[in-house]
Amino acid sequence: MEVKEIYEKKIWEDFLLQCKEKTFLQSWSWGQFHISMGNKIWRFGIYEQEELRAVTLVVKIKSRRASFLLVPHGPIVNSKFKNQNAKLLSILLEKLKELAKQEKVDFIRISPILIRSEENDSLFKSFGFKTAPLHYHPESSWKLNIEPKEQELFDKMRKTTKYLIKKAQNNKEIEIFQSKDINDIEIFNKIHLEVVKKQKFVPFSLDYFKKEFLAFLPDNNIAIFFAKYQGKIIAASYGIFWSHMSFYHHAALLPEYRKIPVSYLLQWEAIKEAKNRGCYIYDFWGYSDPVKSPKHPYSGPTLFKMGFGGYKEEYVKTQDFIITKKYWLNFIIEKIRKIKRGL
């Protein structure tokens, strides 16, 4: 087996189309997003002779305390070769160590897309990885199979969720619409900042939101969903539609309107749009067990997501491979951040 860089979008996207376990964080567009943010990227393919068996996007993240190579929700392995995970990871790690030396980074961070299990957890340990102090991307997600008919999906929802969707549908003062206008990102951002004030978390920048939107726009793989109430936009969410999957990535609701059930109808309209686009899976993005961790910041949003039906999927926790001693400064800072955020 050997690792080669992939420079053709079609080769990359065609391979991912065959893979079941994946997220948009390994899409060609996400690589373009990172380039627009000023980050260096590599798109590697692992080949056996001329057959492509796995791919992984690698991003160089630079910071004052430590720099690292990030593999976001990867590597992606063709399901036919799942029994070769150990060999594929070994080959990839050697390439990443070589790249880490070349790029003078302090560690390698992988956010795996492998289902969490004793076997998969021990796989990373066997190669010298340690569990990261803080996750970079979601380590668990709430998903919904949207292949059944629309009415069947609606019928399987929680009783309260169905009631609130119908209530919103019957309210003539509520309107849901989509936009692909880059200028409307500023409307989304204003709502987002109001949520930030209330919940006190570090927000993504307006530049981040715009560049993410522009990365997926050329392939028509993104839309913003807005909800109006009494003529005023009070809620919005990003929908990403890629490789037969849909992702609920960002969302915001003006805090003073939290009792108006627009979020339920907004979500339902996004699910219907995903079905219309031929998606099979709707990924609600991010899950925290509301029973085991009721005080977790994601527990409230998780209860909302669960009302639509579906199932949880947990991935192997984020893994770090240490390159230099500078890693430990980053480790301590992230550990403190995790405690402060209640994660």
Image: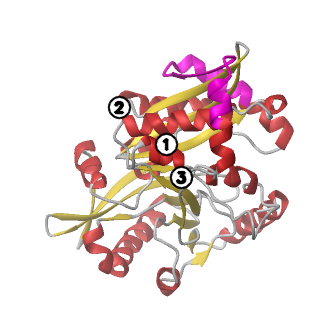
Q: Which residue is mark 1?
A: 34
Mark 1 or 2: the one toward you: 2
SS label for mark 3: loop
Callout count: 3
Which residues are drawn in magenta?
165-191
Amino acid tagged 3: Lys
Nearer to us: label 3 or label 1 = 3
The relative height of residue 43 versus residue 318 in the rendered view (above or below) is above
> 68 and 210: which one is in front?
210
Is 153 a magenta residue? no
- Which comes before the other along the chain, label 3 or label 2? 3
Name the residue: 59% across, 19% down.
184
Residue 185 is one of the magenta-drawn residues: yes
Find out whether the residues at labels 3 and 2 contact each other: C-beta distance under 8 Å: no
How much space separates mark 1 and mark 2, taking CA atoms?
Answer: 17 Å
**What amino acid type should be assigned to the residue bearing mark 2?**
Asp
The circle drawn on residue 219 is 2
Residue situated furthest left in the rendering: 50
Residue named by callout 3: 156
User: Left or right: 327 with respect to 177?
Assistant: right
